[in-house]
Each structure stands twice: as C-alpha cells, then as structure tokens.
Image (spheres, rainbow, N blue to C red):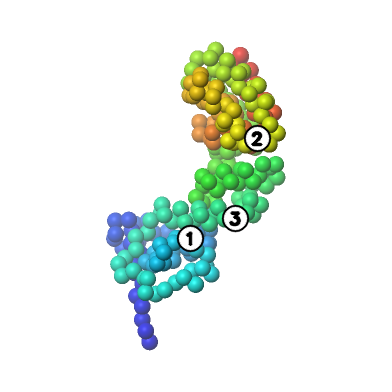
Amino acid sequence: PQYGHLPLILASDRSKMSKRHGAVSLLEYREQGFLPAGILNYLALLGWSAKDDREEYTLAELVEAFDISQVHKSGAVFDVVKFKSVNQRHMRNIPADAFASMLEHDALVHHPKRDAIVRLLQERAQTLGEAKEMLSGELSCLFSDPKPEKSELILKGDIDTTKRHLEALQPLILAFGEDFTTDTAKDALMPYADKEGRAEVLWPLRYALSAKQKSPDPFTLISILGKQESVSRIQDALAILEG
C-alpha cells in the first residue's frame, strides 16, 4: 500500500484546530448559510493548491485538477475570511430565481425587480445567512414603506436646506428615461450633488428612500424602487419636515 499524509488544519495562531480555537461543525456552517459547494471547495484548498493557484472549483473540476504531488507538507491555516470569499463566489453563480427561493423570502420571489435585488445580495453577502439578515435589515425598505425620522433627515444640514434639496431632486428623477439604471441615475443626480454638497444632498435622499442608517446608495435604491415610488417617498419625507 502507498500512504499519503494530509497536513493538519491549524487555527489562525497556527495551533492545532480545536473547539477552543473556533472549530465549528459542518452542520453549523450549513446553518450559517454556507453552500455545500463552497464548503467542499474551501476544504479542498486546505493543504492543496493547483499549479495555476486557481481557487474556485466545482466538484467535477476538483476531481480533474487534483494532483497529490501538490499537497503541501506544512499545516494549513483555516482562514474564515477566505472561506467566506470562496463561498461568495459560488453564491454568485446561482441563478436569480433559485437564489431567491433559497432565501425563503416570499416578497423577494415575487418582486418585479427580483433579479436586481438578488445581484445586490450576491455582491454584498458572503453567506445565505448574511443575505437573509440584509433582507430583514438594510434592504427591508425595498419591500415596505419607510418611516423616516425628522431629526435624521436633517442630520447633514438644516431643515430649509434639506427641503430645498429634496424638492430640487424630484424633477430630476422624474426626467429619467423608462429604462434607467443605477449608473444613469447617478450621472443625472451627481452634478447637482457636487454643486450643492454631496453629504447635504445624498444623505437626506438616501434616508428618505430607506429610513435606514445603513442601506445601498440612493442611485441603487431609485433604480429598484422606480421613479414614481422614489418621488412618493421624497414627498413623504418633505411632509415630515413640514410637520
């Protein structure tokens, strides 16, 4: 018989991996939203690498590429950051309809801009768990009306200036073409923001659209919400400032 020895998996401090050093069962990773393909891919890279230093593989590609001569002799450090990065690459390969179903979010599945929201999730989230948290947190404004607070709307300026900017932005948004994108929205609104002050213009705009301290940029929000809904939310924010 011929024997081969695979390197030990080490903690970040290069000590032997154990529960004391953050070792986690596969079931826990699955519950966190790591994909089977992402887990398999990353485990294969622990102590082995292809000659071309490639990092993204399907199972079939791993079978084809594996060469025992490329197995490392030293221990392999388990890097959660890299693990998440590998998992995210596999998430980005999932079609929008399948990805939305995996998240078990009915409003997303039936949203008219489902694909755009999925792309946003795949860009920002590294696990399905993180994607679900985003849907119930910073992206919840895409599925229900926001409830902005007056003090937050004027966080970056005074009330009169904030009102002036929100009023000026409405006709600019309504002038967008029917098939506008995030980039065209940015191109149309940024000249005004640059002239008047980015923080004073973009903060109340983003907050009026989302009522969130943390959310996608206003151009992305407008491209998903659409012109009419975006202007309606701006008008609601103006009503709050008048109150």
The percent position of residue 99, horizontal first and vertical second, equals: 61, 52
> From what the image shows, is residue 25 above or below residue 181?
below
Among the two numbered marks 2 and 3 on one chain, the one whose residue lies closer to the N terminus = 3
Q: At numbered mark 2, what does the secondary structure look like: helix, strand or loop? A: loop
Among the two numbered marks 2 and 1 on one chain, the one whose residue lies closer to the N terminus = 1
To which residue does mark 3 refer?
94
Name the residue located 29 percent from the left edge and 60 percent from the top edge: 15
Which mark is in front, 2 or 3? 2
Residues under numbered marks 1 and 3 in contact, where contact means CB atoms less than 8 Å apart: no
Name the image quarter holding the C terminus.
top right
Query: Viewed as shown, does residue 48 lie left or right of 229?
Result: left
To which residue does mark 1 refer?
56
Distance from the alpha carbon under mark 2 to that under mark 1: 34 Å
Distance from the alpha carbon under mark 1 to that under mark 3: 14 Å
Name the residue located 39 percent from the left edge and 75 percent from the top edge: 68
To which residue does mark 2 refer?
180
Q: Nearer the viewer, residue 57 or 234?
A: 57
